[in-house]
Amino acid sequence: MHWRGAPRDERPRRNGHRHDGLSPASEPWLTDGLSASGDATRHAALAPEKPSDVSAIFTDQYPTNERTFDNKLRNTDYSSNFILLYEVRMPRVDAYQVAPTIKYGELGWTSWRTVTAPMARASRDPEALDMPPESEDVIATTVVRYSAEATPRRVRLPVYDEETGALRSEMTVRAES
């Protein structure tokens, strides 16, 4: 399907760079993201261009090393890539992670400057989580780099259950102007 103004022959694609993990809600990874003290349960951010200060995006709790995504944000070629950050807060007993998928929907342009990026959520054993046992809520954070000929202004994020394929949630994130 081709939408006027969208690239004709180029689908956005995940180009192999993703970082995800679970953290206690009391130790959030993103400065403007979810936390134990807020009411929000989902948060997403779209980075179609290099952030002016990558270190301002992540909190001190974010586990930095040479392979973590803060380095990818600094070194990405934004003329042909964009970054999507997605977080979900849930009770520890219901822990799951979210990752890109093409099993239940296609990654692609759906309208002028809008990309659909399907995600799947996979349950995790709350007893196996590497965090303090007193952590009641956890945050699943996913950071993905996508390649595309054009930069989207919006990304539609349907999230499917990994086992059943049922649509669990959906949101649209817009690039900041």
Image: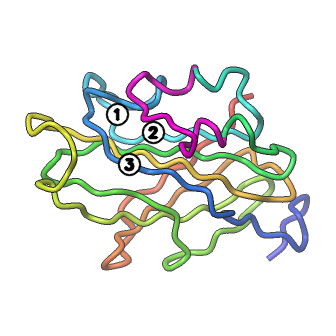
For the record, the magenta segment spans 56-72
Cα separation, mark 3 vs mark 1, equals 19 Å
The kind of residue on which mark 1 rests is: Ala
* Crowd rating for badge 1 (residues with CA inside 10 Å; few <14, some 14–19, many 20+): few
Counting from the top left corner in percent of width and height, residue 101 is at 52, 70
Name the residue located 23 percent from the left edge and 61 percent from the top edge: 124
Query: Is residue 28 part of the magenta span, yes or no?
Result: no
* Crowd rating for badge 3 (residues with CA inside 10 Å; few <14, some 14–19, many 20+): some
Residue 177 or residue 73, whichever sits in front: 73
The answer to the question of whether label 3 and label 2 lie on touching residues, with beta carbons closer than 8 A, is no
The kind of residue on which mark 2 rests is: His
Residue 55 or residue 98, whichever sits in front: 55
Counting from the top left corner in percent of width and height, residue 85 is at 54, 43
User: Can you identify the residue that label 2 sits on?
Assistant: 43
The answer to the question of whether label 1 and label 2 lie on touching residues, with beta carbons closer than 8 A, is yes
For this orientation, the residue located farthest to the front is 66
User: Can you identify the residue that label 1 sits on?
Assistant: 40
Q: Earlier in the sequence, mark 3 or mark 1?
A: 3
Cα separation, mark 1 vs mark 2, equals 7 Å
Counting from the top left corner in percent of width and height, residue 119 is at 48, 63
The kind of residue on which mark 3 rests is: Gly
